[in-house]
Amino acid sequence: SLARMQGAAGPPEKSRVQLDEVVREVAEDAEFEAQERNCAVRVVGNIKCNTQGSPDLLRSAVENVVRNALRYTASGSEVEITLANRDSTAEITVRDHGPGVPESELGNLFLPFYRVANARERETGGTGLGLAITDRAVRLHGGTVAAANAPGGGLLVKITMPAQCG
């Protein structure tokens, strides 16, 4: 998937994508996995938003972030997803309640095959490609993705892209 996107100049297909539906569907699908880990996925804000692009790529971008958050969030906690409107853009924020990431490594999270050192020692699996796929898919849609440690612990990943919301 990543190799195909790296060779692409833009999204392979353009159609209207309801971002609020993408967020809802990803959350519903991830809830099954969350229950197995004694966690939950909760949509805490989800306004109507749409954009032009590839439904499959955008779903993959959001799903990779949510599944990553589930992998690291503490047992008994929630992964929170918010879709908000900021200055004519859609902002999808995913917050987990895990250990967070050392500040010096935040900028590397979206590089292919990159895994935080302590994550390699845990039994969380993963190849280090999910967030790289997210980054490329979002950039193909004219957006950005960034990560920051959340106040009180955990990680916040924010996807921002052009959209019509309201």
Image (tube, grey):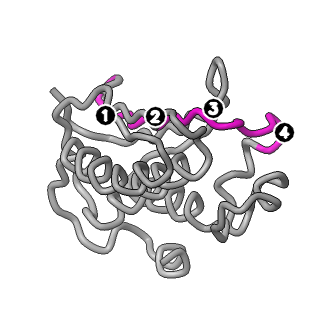
**Tag shown at residue 138:** none
Viewer-nearest of discs 4 and 1: 1
- Circle 2 or circle 1, nearest the eye: 2
Badges 2 and 3: C-beta atoms under 8 Å apart? no
Amino acid carrying label 1: it is Val
Q: Is residue 120 left or right of residue 134?
A: right
Q: Is residue 74 above or below residue 124?
A: above
Disc 4 crowd, CA 10 A, few/some/many (<14, 14-19, 20+): few
Q: If you read the primary sequence from the N terminus, does the residue marked by circle 2 or circle 3 appear first?
A: 2
Residue pointed to by mark 3:
154
| Number of residue marks | 4
Disc 4 versus disc 2: distance between alpha carbons?
26 Å
Which residue matches tag 4? 104
Kindly identify the residue that appears in the image at 25 percent across and 51 percent down: 22
x then y, percent, for residue 147:
61, 38
Q: Residue at x 50, y 58 (%)?
A: 134
